[in-house]
Amino acid sequence: MAKKSKKAKGKAASKAPARKVAKAARRPAAKKAVKKNAKPAAKKSAAKSAKSTMPRISSKPFGLDGKALQGVRILDFTHVQSGPTCTQLLAWFGADVIKVERPGVGDITRGQLVDVKGADSLYFTMLNHNKRSITIDSKHPQGKRVLDELIKSCDVLVENFAPGALDRMGLTWEHIHKTNPRIVVASIKGFGPGPYEDCKVYENVAQCTGGSASTTGFRDGPPLVTGAQIGDSGTGLHLALGIVTALYQRTRTGRGQKVSVAMQDGVLNLCRVKLRDQQRLKAGPLKEYSQFGQNIPFGDATPRAGNDSGGGQPGWILKCQGWETDPNAYIYFITQAPVWGPICDLIGEPTWKTDPEYATPPARLPKLMQIFDRIEQWTKTKSKFEVMELCNAHDIPVGPILSMKEIAEDQSLRKTGTVVEVDHPTRGAYLTVGNPIKLSDSISEVKRSPLLGEHTDEILRDVLKLKANVIAEIKASGALSAPEKKEKAA
Ligand code: COA
């Protein structure tokens, strides 16, 4: 192993994808192109700096010159939802994501909320597309050596273990940075440094501690968590941005850095308008909140706003035809000031256009609920899609409450690749959400999630360049298999 390690080290270093990119940036072709066009001195120096960072403009058609993150290799130590969301995004953009899983067990979500016996759950498959899976016991001495080799071969290590777990594996920042100074080490934890830094955190804990739950729900009800996974998936998104930013900085500095996102911080970032309102309370009641019109006094913290819109344009959820039996026969209706006239005409209250009691936004604020009641009398006579059509003809912003069934069946979302059908060897076809970020030159395809350890041999052979006898030696040590097998092998 030691001998092979050296070899792997040398090859990994010389093949580091980032270096390839940097090399490409220094291609003489780019130099020539710049020289030809830039004559005056100022232009020359601008061109000189551009020359040092930019490769020649590709002449290939858009979408045919590789993917955005092609050449970036990620050592993916993530599990459950937050970390996997991040690495799945990077994989969609073309990064080679190597998911390290505990032998015999894997990511715990493989076996959670199982709907097809014996197959990986949708919980797992829908968060781990386009990745490769290798099983390694990270606490086994041989496993640690394999991991060190992988660290040398990767551009990014991503993890969302409980605080201290990575250190307990011996993978401290110091060790990782010393092993590969170019690697970016990205982590998600529940909290940043402070009184709660050692706590384990799941989605709803983050929603509660990041300010979302206290500001969601109705004023006279308890705090509510939202269906959108802003704690997990939201933090994964933040981390992905941190990673690509660190990779971009590395093209200049040559070195990796730590990227950390706390779930509490990620949620708070998404709740910033509520911190805005907290400060506005000092200046008086929040007039766009319907409780203002109801003469209910404000307390000392941002209240729950029900379905009030978060901005300056009042909105509310209104019943549509069929609401008595269909829990989603509703529409979000925004009384945007510039289209107040068409709203009045549509609902049959043309006099409200000029009546000083209704004609201006400040006049309407104290009676928002009464106005929405009147609009609802109209929406209740139409289906949510009819309201959508009638209102959009006048640029009135409305949004039908779409059920997950309606979204799953929506053909326009299928066409854009936002909802994708994927085939899987053990569970068959299923629907997933594809890459919501569309790049015109980096086309995303959604490939099924890996089976547990499906790529173990392939990664040892093709990434670490290990010979078959060395791979067999590592396997026999028990570093890649579940503990029971380890005992047998010993
Ligand atoms: N080989 C050997 N051991 C492994 C391993 C591998 N390949 N992969 C994981 N483990 C071990 C870890 O080292 C750890 O052992 P230790 O506690 O003895 O050091 C153990 O598995 C459990 O890891 P942990 O992260 O504590 O998992 P958990 O199931 O107890 O907790 C979370 C799950 C999500 C609560 C926790 O990981 C966490 O708080 N993460 C940060 C916040 C986060 O991302 N939360 C949202 C998740 S969607």
Image (cartoon, rainbow, N blue to C red):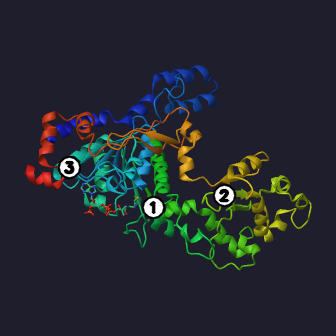
For label 2, count other residues whose C-alpha is less than 10 Å away and answer few (under 14), some (14-19) or many (20+).
Answer: some
Across and down, in percent, residue 155 comes to 37, 42
* In this rendering, the label closer to the viewer, 2 or 3: 2
Across and down, in percent, residue 453 comes to 26, 44
* Label 1, label 3: how far apart the Cα atoms are: 29 Å
Left or right, residue 118 beside residue 436 = left
420 versus 327 height, above or below: above
Judging from the image, what secondary structure is the residue with disc 2 in?
loop
> In this figure, which residue is indicated by the disc labeled 1?
262
* Label 2, label 3: how far apart the Cα atoms are: 60 Å
Of residues 85 and 331, the one nearer the viewer is 331
Give the amino acid at mark 3.
Gly
* In this rendering, the label closer to the viewer, 2 or 1: 2
Give the amino acid at mark 2.
Gly
Judging from the image, what secondary structure is the residue with disc 3 in?
helix
For label 1, count other residues whose C-alpha is less than 10 Å away and answer few (under 14), some (14-19) or many (20+).
Answer: many
Residue at 61%, 24% in the rendered image: 38
Give the amino acid at mark 1.
Ala
Is the shortest distance between ligand 1 and the CB of mark 3 under 8 Å? yes
> In this figure, which residue is indicated by the disc labeled 2?
322
Of callouts 2 and 3, the N-terminal one: 3
**Are the residues at dot 2 and dot 1 in contact (C-beta closer than 8 Å)?**
no
Left or right, residue 425 beside residue 394 = left
Residue 50 falls in image quadrant: top right
Residue at 47%, 50% in the rendered image: 242
Across and down, in percent, residue 317 comes to 68, 61
Of callouts 1 and 3, the N-terminal one: 3
49 versus 238 height, above or below: above
Of callouts 2 and 1, the N-terminal one: 1
Judging from the image, what secondary structure is the residue with disc 1 in?
strand
> In this figure, which residue is indicated by the disc labeled 3?
143
Across and down, in percent, residue 151 comes to 29, 45
